[in-house]
Amino acid sequence: MKPNLKRILIIAVIVIAIVLVWFIFFHKKAVPVTLQTEKPTTGYIAQSVTATGKIEPVDTVTVGTQVSGILKYLYADFNSKVKKGELLAELDKSLLQATVDQFKGNLQNAQSQLVFAKNNFNRQSLLFKADAISKADYDTALNTLDAAKASVASAQAQVRSAEKNLSYADIYSPIDGVVLNRNISVGQTVAASFSTPTLFVIAKDITKMQVQANVDEADIGDVKAGNRSSFTVDAFINDQFGGTVQEIRLHPTVSANVVTYTTIINAPNDDMKLKPGMTANIVIYTKEVNNAMLIPAKALAFTPDSALMNDYQIVGKVPHTGTHKHGAGGSSGANQISHSAKSRTDTTGVTKQKAYVWLLQGKKLVQTRIEIGLNDNTHVQVLSGLTSDDLVATGTSGGAAGAATASASPGGSPFLPKRPQGGGGKTR
């Protein structure tokens, strides 16, 4: 019996030791549940649309040539500032000048024939009046005179055409601006037989740029001319540039089955930081409200559970759908926003929607219906139903759920997938 008693005592000591170790090192005291509340604040809230696009000059002009030839002189280069009427380049004029000289010679010959035809017609006219020649001879002289006049007119037209082509050998700037691109070099042959070759691309005024934003079809319905926008470029990542929506072009662009609409945003460029072709990350503010009453967005998702019933009196409808999270990601059926067809808009164009929040009134949690407007997923605009002194419940801290989360987070491996939390909450 003694060995059995000794064995029993050893087992009892081991069990007691295990219980003590668990109680001292692993047992966590229940953390009391604390209700988190916030008062409504006043501030700015906006609804926005994001897009990407390219920065381009407001107006560009492509300078070409109407005649073919070899480029002989070049007076402008990349980034050159030019004035309207300034000479940019010259083509070799030797062949064009020879053509002008040839047609001038033809004109002189036609004018000489015209003088001879006039004199002959005058003689024949006198003879015809004296009945010295026949009517046929008179008509022949008249026809010769008319043909000589037509030949002179044709030769004059040829001279004007040749002189005009000769003038086209001088390439002038049509506007004041900056040369963005030069596609030719001295000695290069320019052929204008089938299409006009591009010699220069000139931007009219690079102190006024525009952003061509590609706005998704799901967002384009909220964008209107006059909306304020801001954008950044990779070259100046810490600078924020401003602009205004000028127009929405109706021609859609389809890429990989994604439909976008080109939206033009005017952007001043007085400091000349913006350069053509830069990629812009754009935010278009479709609706903005200043001095709005704001509450945290997570207040719409808060629902009290049984842990709060010990300390607070719940006044309102609490859905019995299991355990809910009370953080920013929680949600419940009672707090779903109403998007009925009867929604109206206020003077700022904000759609009114119905929602429910819980107010702390002493030891009571009272469910209250409110009307909300803009929601930027951080704050929600309250249109009616609250005052600035109300305490709005936004979540809870402590309790069994909080203790479990606190104990699981430090000891968990960062390489293992996290266990999903209960409650069926969703991120708004």
Image: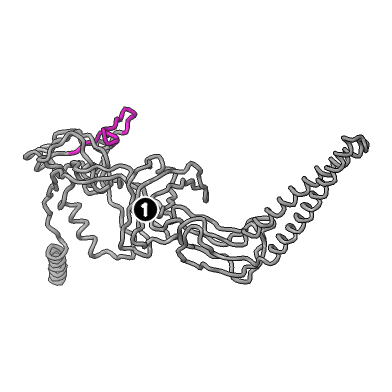
Coloring basis for residues: one colour
Query: Seen in the image, is 10 located left or right of residue 58?
Result: left
Determine whether 258 is above or below 279 in the image: above
Tell me, yes or no, whether the highlighted magenta stretch contains residue 15.
Answer: no
Q: In the rendered view, does 117 fall on the left or right side of 341?
A: right
Q: Which residue is mark 1?
A: 267
Q: Quadrant of the N terminus?
A: bottom left
Which of the image's four quarters has the C terminus?
top left
Whether residue 44 is situated above or below residue 191 in the rendered picture: above
Picture mark count: 1
* Residue at left offset 59%, top offset 67%: 184
**Judging from the image, what secondary structure is the residue with disc 1 in?**
strand
Query: Considering depth in this image, is 173 or 289 the residue closer to the camera?
Result: 173
* Nearer to us in this view, 208 or 423: 208
Residue at horizontal 43 percent and vertical 54 percent from the top:
53
Residue, far front? 130
Magenta stretch: helix, strand or loop mostly? loop
Residue 251 appears in the picture as rendered: yes
Q: Position of residue 410 (x, y in %)?
A: 23, 64
Look at the image and give the residue range highlighted in magenta.
339-357
Q: Is residue 130 above or below residue 237?
A: above
Q: Amino acid at mark 1?
A: Ala
